[in-house]
Image: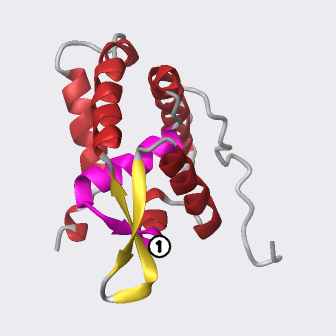
Amino acid sequence: MTGDTPRRTTASRATDRPGDPSPFALGLLLRRAHWHAAGVMTEALRPLGIELRHFAVLIVLVDRGPTVQRDLAAATGSDKAGIMRVVDDLERRGLAVRRAVATDRRARAVEITPEGLELFDAAHGAAEPLAERLVAGLGPGEPEQLTDLLTRFAHPADDEA
């Protein structure tokens, strides 16, 4: 800090506790909520032999169809090496395949297999009771309200243009 910047002696410090008034509170709460939800969903996927990182790729493939690896990396927040490992894992399990892209011989598109679709559907079935447990402490209508608020937060209106 420079000598010209006034020091706030009553500044709120991020604590990650309920009621934290700091400007970091929302981010800290979202991080904690993510860890909680990811733990529950990891529990749902474990019997199927995949991890959240694998399921994240399957979600993109179901949504977009065959997708080049660089786009998979961007869609899942992964890096090039990380996405290659995940796709390798999915290929070994027979859940996805890489295919040549006709318009770019250097690129490979990843495509979900019928077995991958079957596992994708099974994961939803396995997650249902755990997802209900995840929101069990909320009141009537609050799970839907939470989903609505998080959707609007994660996909602001200006992103839709």
Please say whether residue 26 is visible from this viewpoint: no
Query: Which residue is label 1 attached to?
Result: 70
Tell me the magenta residue range. Answer: 52-71
Q: Residue 145: x and y, percent?
A: 21, 31
Magenta span main SS: helix
* Quadrant holding the N terminus: bottom right
Q: Residue 39: x and y, percent?
A: 54, 26
Q: Nearer the viewer, residue 25 or 108?
A: 108
Q: Residue 18: x and y, percent?
A: 54, 26
Q: Residue 74: x and y, percent?
A: 45, 67
Q: Is residue 117 left or right of residue 160?
A: right
Q: Residues within 10 Å of mark 1 (few under 14, many from 20)?
A: some
Vertical arrangement, residue 2 with respect to residue 138, above or below:
below
User: Magenta stretch containing residue 69, yes or no?
Assistant: yes
Q: Is residue 124 left or right of residue 40?
A: left
Q: Nearer the viewer, residue 4 or 151?
A: 151
Q: Is residue 62 left or right of residue 101?
A: left
Q: Nearer the viewer, residue 33 or 11?
A: 33
Picture residue at 34% right of the left edge, 67% below the top: 67
Picture residue at 51% right of the left edge, 55% below the top: 87
User: Label 1 sits on what residue type?
Assistant: Arg
Please say whether residue 80 is visible from this viewpoint: yes
User: Magenta stretch containing residue 94, yes or no?
Assistant: no
Picture residue at 64% right of the left edge, 44% below the top: 12
Mark 1: secondary structure: helix
Picture residue at 34% right of the left edge, 11% below the top: 136
* Quadrant holding the C terminus: bottom left
Vertical arrangement, residue 12 with respect to residue 102, above or below:
above
Which coloring applies here? Answer: secondary structure
- Disc tally is 1
